[in-house]
Amino acid sequence: MIDLRRLRQDPDEVRASLARRADPTLNALVDRVLDLDRDRRALLVEVESLKATRNASSEEVARRKQAGQSADDLLGALRASGERVKELDSSLRVVDEELERVALALPNLPHPETPDGDASANRVVRVWGTAPEFDFTARPHWDLGERLDLLDLPRGAKIAGSGFPLFTGVGARMVRSLAAFMLDLHTKEHGYREISPPYVVNSASMHGTGQLPKFAEEMYQVPADELYLIPTAEVPLTNMHRDEVLESEDLPVSLVAWTPCFRREAGAHGRDTRGLIRVHQFDKVELVRLVKPETSEEELALLTAHAETVLQRLELPYRVLELAAGDTGFASARTFDLEVWAPGVEAWLEVSSASSFTDFQARRSNIPYRPARGEKPQFVHTLNASGVAFARVIAALLETHQSEDGSVRIPAALVPYVGLERLVPAD
């Protein structure tokens, strides 16, 4: 949630910042928030004034009774003002609820360094590695996966529907191996604390990180228990510290988790439906950091580098894109996407987004920290990155390291986990 005090003090600056997202509906939302905020403050002034008057009148009633004087006039006024206070309190609750509802619909303010424009203005920051060139026609990963007996997409669809891949044999072992490799890298070399979180969360958790209310249609729900399947481990990891006051020495908090992720991908039907490019369930290692505001920028660079290390160790050529304001996610202020090159489908595949949410999620989740003993708490900055997502990485691994005979080389960093140097077709 954006800082309402900042909006109140400088609405034009906030409008200009939000205008960079190129969403014509946001200006009306800002107007509505400002109107509701004015209504709320006016109600508070009247309530406090009435309560002060009632306190003074109550003291006068007590004085008159002690003096044996009549206080009927004051008692009548007190009853009337009491009813008015109840009405105002009720109105205030309604305004508070509506203000929160509308304010939660406002996205984060883009970072000043974020480029202007839509997705066409995303800029390539750097490229690592060289895309492989083959003297044969590169096969797509679904062909390779079937020939190597790694994937059984038809049976996955039979069990759960399209978009729920089934990994078999060495394919299942690759999923487990990728998890172990990434967790070892991030815990032993990058200093993250490993967490195994719940795979379902409550609505407060979804609101805290910004998935609700905007992305309700994207979520898999468990209505009977009022729970949601996690779209990413970012949600439970960030909410571990919801409604807690952290101390300065607690920061940065660095957390990593391996979980399945569930996304309905509403509205994405018909796009990239073959293979592993767009699926409803996939495994991912997630990195989350809670940091001091003054270190936020360097922490984002560090987080991005941690995700890049995974791709470098897997010997996957990739590029880093800085997203333009119009393509930056709802809760993010600044995002760098990591895209690997998949030669079989001849496409760049996003496998990680490293994002700074500034204090947006911390306000929604109420995660302050105390800069020093006795000082007023302020909100932390939250950051997260995929470190990284498995499905598309597996697609890129198969397509990048394939040979003409249909075999696939296992990158050296992954060999100790998989136990094989090369995957070879049975035929």
Image (cartoon, helix red, strand yellow):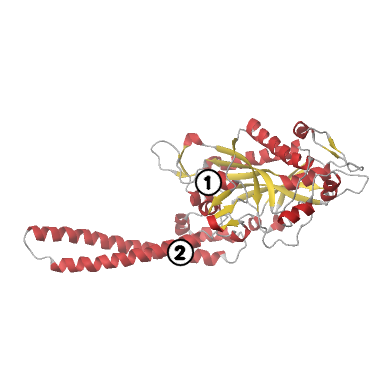
Local crowd at mark 2 within 10 Å, few (<14), some, or many (≥20)?
some
User: What residue is drawn where x is 73% and y is 37%?
Assistant: 177
Image position of 215 (left or right of 245): right
Q: Position of residue 235 (x, y in %)?
A: 57, 48
Q: State the residue at coordinates (70%, 57%).
A: 119
Q: Residues within 10 Å of mark 1 (few under 14, many from 20)?
A: many
Mark 2 = which residue? 98
Quick check: 298 left or right of 292? right
- The residue indicated by pointer 1 is 239
Give residue 179's quadrant in the image: top right
Number of callouts in the render?
A: 2
- Residue 316 appears in the picture as rendered: no
Q: Is residue 333 visible?
A: yes
Query: Above or below — where is 279 with respect to 78?
Result: above
> Between residues 3 and 348, which one lies in front from this camera angle?
348
The picture places residue 109, in percent across and down from the top left corner, at 56, 55
Instruction: Please determine whether, in this image, residue 294 is positioned above or below residue 17.
Output: above
Residue projecting furthest to the right: 135
Q: Amino acid at mark 2?
A: Glu
Numbered label attached to residue 125: none
Q: Choose between 37 and 93: the one closer to the eye.
A: 93
Looking at the rendered image, the disc whose residue lies closer to the viewer, 2 or 1, is: 1
- The mark that comes first in sequence, 2 or 1, is 2
Q: Quadrant of the C terminus?
A: top right
Provide residue 346's location: percent of width, then percent of height.
83, 51
Residue 360's place in the image compared with 39, above or below, is: above
Q: CA distance from mark 2 to mark 1?
A: 24 Å
Name the residue rendered at 71%, 35% in the picture. 181
Q: Nearer the viewer, residue 10 or 197?
A: 197
